[in-house]
Amino acid sequence: MMPEETTRLILGARTKGLLALTSVAVLGLGWLATPPEAQKPVAETMAPILETEVQRREPGRLFRGVREAGLVALPFTAAFVRSAPGRGTVADFAAATAPPGRPAGFGLVVSRGGEVLSHRDALGSSRTATAVLAGGGRVAGEVVAYDPETGLVLVQLEQATWTELPPAGAERAAPGTAAVAVGHLDGLEFVAPVFLAAAREDGYVLTGAGGTLLPGMPVVNLDGQTLAVTAAGAAPVRAYAVAPALARLHGRIAQGRALPRTIGLTLQTIDSELSRLLGAGGAVIADIERSGPGERAGLHVGDVVLALAGRQVTTVPQTLEAIAALPADEPASVTVRRGTREASVSVVPRVTFEHPGERTDGSPARVGPRAEEVFTPAALQRARLRPDAVVLEVAGVATSSAADVKAARRGRKGPLLVRVRQDRRPFFAVVEPDA
């Protein structure tokens, strides 16, 4: 066999091997990890995924963007990885599926001082982070701001050596624009071609390789300009524009609301109906996080919060604002009304990365009777309760069966304070049983 023919066959076999490997990466791992020299096979492998008019019109431009735009952006990315197991480590998001060394997510370096814009799902619930920089080296960092509405976080690294930052993209890219989501870890390039399916006020909705993205990946247009940072890798993927996201996070820092506090309570407004049985003012604790700060301090479901750190509160918004103003990890007094007397406990707030709408009841799972089994339709209608609501307590007595409800009602006349779970949400209601 001639030397030229041998060389041609070897090169052909290597190309086929690269294509096969990257196909496995796309289908099996859900993201791409290939050396820089393999960017062209990566792009070609991704082509079947990108079933859009833009891809069919401009495949050459898209592939060129995958090769070039990704490399332009890589020096400005940081990968967040698992540290040694233990308290304060990162990547809870990927712990169940990713072996050590795999990225849990990425971030975009946005300042020479070492600020990295990312998404909370790249960090799990931790306030600390270990970042692997594109230029090499691992740097410790800490979350300094969190936006509950978007899930975006601002991580401050302990040291930074950047002399340049990624070029900013247009203020608003048009829907249908081809782009790439990029990342870098230990010499490997992570590239996922995407399209901006829709432009929103705070960013974009991505299609194409949506299921292959990790949180915090910078999204770069084919001119190498940074547009946005991805949220978690569910479909459809949201990507938040960099400038508005930074403005919100820096605004929270300026307002003293950089990191939300929690004491593990689900609060409910005391309306006119509830005030008949709980008294006026304050916010009632409708549920409490198991082993959370409030439960450890001795707070109970049904307590009415009256003051925090000496600051009186009369509504749920006031209570939440007062909690947010408490110093994290320092004791603070909470005054509550418990029945007919007042009590004061000392609670240590902690930082939370929960979204305000994500909390469900923190009580141990308990199966109680359905409301329709223990109250008449007329009584439920007056209380604005659905028949399938689960009755958890009646007059402060836990109820796991219809017999428990009957026992709790025995000898009681007039309206009953009932705690139920409806749509996974616990709350109090006033039920006036029929005679």
Image (cartoon, rainbow, N blue to C red):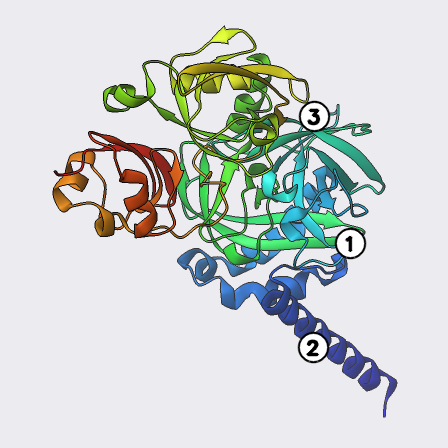
Q: Which quadrant would the N terminus be assigned to in this image? A: bottom right
Q: Quadrant of residue 337?
A: top left
User: What residue is rendered at 24% in x and 19% in y?
Assistant: 272
Q: Is 112 situated above or below 134?
A: above
Q: Secondary structure at mark 3?
A: loop
Amino acid type, residue under disc 3 in the picture: Ser
Identify which residue, 98 or 418, lies in the foreground.
Answer: 418
Q: Where residue 206 appears, x then y in whole percent?
A: 47, 49
Residue 361 percent coordinates (x, y): 45, 40
- The tag on residue 111 is 3
Question: Mark 2 or mark 3, which has the lower sequence index?
Answer: 2
Dot 1 crowding, Cα within 10 Å, few <14, some 14–19, many 20+: few
Q: Which mark is residue 16?
A: 2
Q: Is residue 111 left or right of residue 364?
A: right
The mark closer to the camera, 2 or 3, is: 3
Position in image of residue 381 (x %, y %) = 15, 39
Q: Which residue is mark 1?
A: 101
Left or right of 348, for residue 383: left
Give the camera-side residue of 102 and 339.
Answer: 339
* Callout 1 secondary element: loop
Marks 2/3: CA–CA distance: 41 Å
